[in-house]
Image (spheres, grey):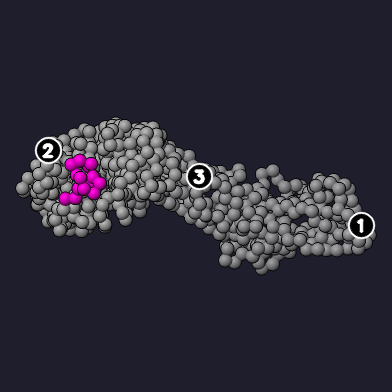
Amino acid sequence: MKLRPRLAALVLSVALASCGGGGGSSAIPAPNAPGQPSASGAAKVRLTIPSQPSGSSSLRRNFVSSGANGAVVAAGSHGGTLTPTTFDISSGSTVCATGSSGRTCTLNVVAPIGSDDFQVTLYDTAPSGGSIPTGAHVLGVSNITNIAVVSGQTPTLPVYVLPTIGNVGLTSHNFVTLPASGVLQTSAILLDPTDFSNAPITAGQNDPYSNPIVVTVTETAGTGTTGHTQLTVNGTNAGTSATLTQSSQSLGIAYDGLGSAGYSASISITAGSTAAQTIVLAPLYVTSASPYFVNGALSFTGLGQTATLNISEASGTNTYVATQSTATACTTGATVGSVTGSGASATVVVTSQAVVAASNGCTISVNDGTATTDAIAYITTTTGPVLQIGGITEYGTPVAVPNVITAGADGNIYVASSLGSTIWGYDTSGNEVNWTVSPPSYAPVSMAPGPDGNIWFVTNGTNSYTYATQPDPTPPVGTFAVPGAMKLTGVALGPNGDMWMIDNMNNAMYDQPPFLSIAGTYALGCSPTLIANGGIAHGEYVVCPGTPSKVVLQRLGVNPMTVTIPGSGVGPSAVAVDSGGNLWIADQTNNALLEYAPTPCIISGGWCTYPIGATDSPAGLAFGSDGNLYFTAPGSNSIGEFNVTTHVFTHFSIPSASANPAGITAGPDGRIWFTEGGVEKMGALTP
């Protein structure tokens, strides 16, 4: 993204000599007051003009534009009025001598003895009748101030002539397209400026352009919003306007990959009064109204399903080609029809043919013929019952490594990926109902239904989020920022009807009412990882792993109470609260369930321990509608049931091997739902 260097800065040699006035005195006079008359001296300006335009490889700094035919040298006392003298420096001029490489012109001007200012202006037209014609163009300007003109001395003065741009020389295409893929895209803007005589220009860092290049961005929103394109100078964001003063600066555009179909940006480039040159950025949009087009990708849920992709570029006339990945799994996974239409309106139909997993990396690539391609990933899974053994029904899900699971207030089940910011919703028949991509780039680590009917979640980061569960391909996601740096590791409905969040970084808990700012902050004195609602009677339970591990009970308006979990090496992995408000903890390290209740447990200060088995390694806990406690047991690839009255364990084997069950929740249908991260499924146990 660089301006192409073509012409070095111009340097003139000015010889100054005195005459008249003091008659050869060697004394250095005091500087003149502004505008004060003085004895006159003489100044010589020597210009070396090349015979033809020179590229950067052969240009010498004392060359001026090859198109220079007229010059005006103005001189006068410092701060006063400058007196101009006009010169013909065209080929054949009496003040110029022509050689093999060009001509050298010596310009004699009158300059007052004392402190003087000079201005040298070069034109593309020779003077007529002693004056530069009105229509002549300025090729360069130099201003030198406060120079001592001394009687009897002839100092040499370096003069830097700042080149004047006559044409910004936009060499990039006047139409640029980038894929609207949601990822930041950049493109270079290549300029090759010339002066009004069409000689190439390069302005160095110390002698910039006399008329800087001004660049502005004007956006057209289309059906969406603006604010997606900005300029960059030397790789740094410059906003929607930038000024380039020298050739060492590089110019580019940065497009965030967003916006809606019809969006475009016009980049106008001009220098002084030169005619503006324009580049139009028209992103390549591939969209679809199909329910299978989710978060910019195709997620088919069965065979023979079709999705129409809409292709467009604002102000474009390009034609498009759609192709799919060449891997065998991809070519048999879907068929891609021919593209119909071009420019701002084109379509192509994709049909699912076989099951394709996300790990296969299959894509539909849409190319606009200008080397711009938008790749649309696609997968095909199956939904609905696929296997039922021993009371467990498994359902396929496109969620990569499903982990966290919860039941929503709308009667549906919501599953989050442990690899990305995706949440999928299912009805109790295993059919997809809605989905979203949350704002952060991290996976949800804790989810819970909120009093507003939405799903709340946190992502090991600074913000909490709420996901609206209406069946909409792009449902709204709200963001709630908690002031300061933190690491939110859990969220649960609080005893006051608000959402409560725990902060592992700051050893704190926050009370967050829906759509309002934080209502309360509670210091815990330990680093929490798990949270559960114990109701008004008990408040909020928070578990802090450590040596020893602890439980904090926080009630509204009451100082927290902290109790130590008995035993060494306790590994809390999940928590749940029974109908009586008592806390249960899965101890993954010791393969046990822990209960905290003053009664009926009479040992270890209200703690009871129930060993499960040597291999279960319990990962998740949930109470069923029957009052029993259910847990995921990845170590034995099963779902465990614990009768809290008889203290009897029952295990249900998961049909799929290496299912790696993790999250678990009680569904509105009376079944126990859980995730199977090892096989990209979810299961439902009928007690």
Q: CA distance from mark 1 to mark 3?
A: 58 Å
Q: Looking at the rendered structure, which numbered label has been put on residue 626?
A: 2
Q: Could you say whether the residue bearing mark 3 is in a helix, strand or loop?
A: strand
Q: From what the image shows, is residue 369 above or below residue 12?
A: above
Magenta span dominant secondary structure: loop
Specify whether 671 is left or right of 376.
Answer: left
Frontmost of labels 1 and 2 is: 2
* Residue drawn where x is 69% and y is 67% of the image: 99
Q: CA distance from mark 1 to mark 2?
A: 117 Å
The quadrant holding residue 622 is: top left
* Residue drawn where x is 18% and y is 55% of the image: 591
* Residue drawn where x is 44% and y is 41% of the image: 483
Residue holding disc 1: 20
Which comes before the other along the chain, label 1 or label 3? 1
Q: CA distance from mark 3 to mark 2?
A: 61 Å
Q: Could you say whether the residue bearing mark 1 is in a helix, strand or loop?
A: loop
Range of residues picked out in magenta = 597-610
Q: Quadrant of the C terminus?
A: top left
Q: Is residue 424 visible?
A: no
Q: Looking at the rendered structure, which numbered label has been put on residue 239?
A: 3
